Image (tube, rainbow, N blue to C red):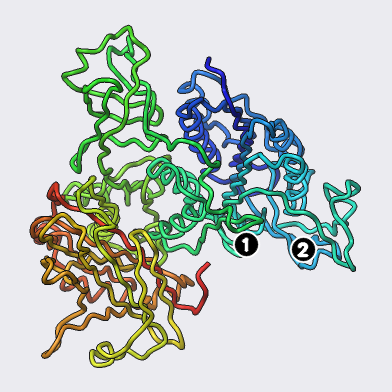
Amino acid sequence: MPECGRTLYASLIGINEYDGNVKPLKGCVKDVLLVDAFLRDFCDQQHPPIEYKPLFLLSPKENSKEVEIYQKSLGTPLNHRSPTFQNVSHSAFSHLEQADNSRKDICLFYFSGHGAITSDVPIGFGTKKLETLVCKDSRYGARDLRDKEIAFLLHKVLDTKPNIHCLVITDCCHAGGLTRAAYLGYRSIENEDSGATLQEYLGYGKGFYKDFGGQLVYPFADYVHLAACTADQKAIDSEAGGYFTKGLVDLLRKEGRTSYRQIAGRLSDAMTVSHYRQTPLALCREDWKLDRKFLGEGLAPLKRSYQLVYNRERSRWQLNAGSIHGLVPSGEFGRSIVRVDGTRIEIELATVELIRSLVVGDDLKLLDVGNDSYAVTLVELAAEPMTMDISRLDKDMKRELIQAYDKKRCLYLNIIDDSRFFSFQAIEKEKEFSLEGYPFLPSKKNAEEFLDDIESVARWTYFKSLDGKPSYFKAEDFEFTVERIEGQPISNSKSLDWVRGKITTISPNTSIYLNYVNNHQPAFRFSIRMCKNLNQEECYVAALYFGSEFGIYDNFLTNVRLSAENPRAHLNYHKTENSLIHAIPLKVHPTFSKKEIECVDEYLKIIVADRPIDLSTISQPDLPLDKSEAMRAGKDRISSKETKESKPIIFLESFAIFHFPIRLCRREQEKV
């Protein structure tokens, strides 16, 4: 084994099953396994490799085999302990204390489980409530770990070690105040206040808490905290894991090295389809340190490389990686291709299981079945159809939905009877079909109408994730300008034409924040200008707009030709008799407000190509979000068999897609 220059000490805590009368969670252990798989890949690819030393405190559901299956894939046991108060407050932090300051080691404290708020606040802290982590036995003989105590334990780890890079990740409710009602559920639980005194706090008597003019003060350690949500929010839990953790791992695997500030911003933008109020945060004692890269500077980005081995028992080649690593098989929407490192051999992912993948290809015969040292790198990844779990329906509703599915031609949705892995989950609500986690979508008595709605949501999600291949069209070849219009009356076309707002230039993947001000809906103008340094005499631009009611619009910008004589194009709302109206008004549907959803997310994609490109087959109408709309729409709605051909779009090789997330808030608030 090569000598390791640095070590990553990770304390990984995941609690699904609690002692006492505490509602269990579903995805917390899965979260830990996702994080662990990423960290192993990340450390192995560093030069020299980083030695990875994890400590596992896990409480899986009774009879769950997910840890057992994962251990077999690793070929080594996790040797996990129980996440009791004693182990979380002592063993987890003692493990981190092994970090060597001279070697610039790395520390990671990760927690996935219930979070709570307590009013057990001694006089002097200057607050009425504290946030807590709920340990396995917190409600059965022990207690919660309070945020002030976490501050003490981290200070103890880091006080004399300025060269240690320390990261804290909490995927639980009220996580933003820490430096999951639980289906989809929340990682939150009521606290049992016991009238604790300062003398009972960890750190008391150690000189950590000091009285400063009647106020208790204490030092803050130097670490970064990635939190699933703000102190007054709840974190979403599901069988597939927490939305925050899954999004974090997917982002890191896709984009590699990125800063903590960018991680929080992009995860906040990405929590879109369910519209739950969950805003990830990045926090640090010194704000500028949020611009550091994930786990510190000087590290290489993760390259998707996996071991390829020949399974003699089953006479097949397979990768020792699967869905937990973000892999998907080839399918009707594309191919998943890997290349054997050091060769030009490319093979295809035919089947993807949780921890392994079956590969096929004529060139496999060129490989030596006795060689266990092959590594492969992912070069192309297919888009995966969305899946809807029907396991929570009774047998009659299952049969009705399956019959409707067999009659229809769903291109973007598969239905499964498996609650372990799914994109959507169908449930029964007052004898009607409903979609878990989408409280704003009306339930449907008719199975075919229900499938129409979910197919539209899946189709919206699929096209929203479309990305371009590397192209000679680069972001720096264009200038993107947005004009934010807030607090002005825009009741008609005339007012839209004259209102003015704040104009700024922005880069792709930068969020556009728009708020209702004085009860006036916002609007925006958007333009793209071709720069002189583009090595093309001309190009064509078009746009797709993804609304929060699951409509897709292609008519805001349609194949405008850019050239030296005409370098700029504007998004257009519609034409009047005399001119185009460039301002696009936005609104939050009243149904969202009724469901206490204050902010919605929409998306603008700008497509640049070397010739005109037809996007009309992507467009789709908004979904009706309440019963009355659904009844009106049902009379005129065209069935999926009668619509224009809805097939995947094959884009030109010479194109690029630039993404601009838009967050629209009904209540007047500052961007978090």
Label 1 element class = loop
Residue 231 is tagged as 1
Q: Can you give x and y, in whole percent of width and height, for residue 50 in the image?
A: 54, 28
Dot placed on the residue nearer the N-terminal end, 2 or 1? 2
Between 491 and 4, the residue placed more toward the observer is 4
Which label sits on residue 119?
2
**Could you tell me which residue is drawn at 25 percent across and 20 percent down?**
343
Rendering quarter of residue 561: bottom left
Q: Is residue 54 above or below residue 601?
A: above
Q: Is residue 447 visible?
A: no
Q: Are marks 2 and 1 in contact (CB under 8 Å)?
A: no
User: For this rendering, which residue is in front, 196 or 271?
Assistant: 271
Tell me: 346 left or right of 177: left
Instruction: Say if residue 259 shows up in the picture.
Output: yes
Residue at (17, 73) in percent of width and height: 635
Residue type at tag 1: Ala
Give the x, y percent position of residue 132.
Answer: 70, 53
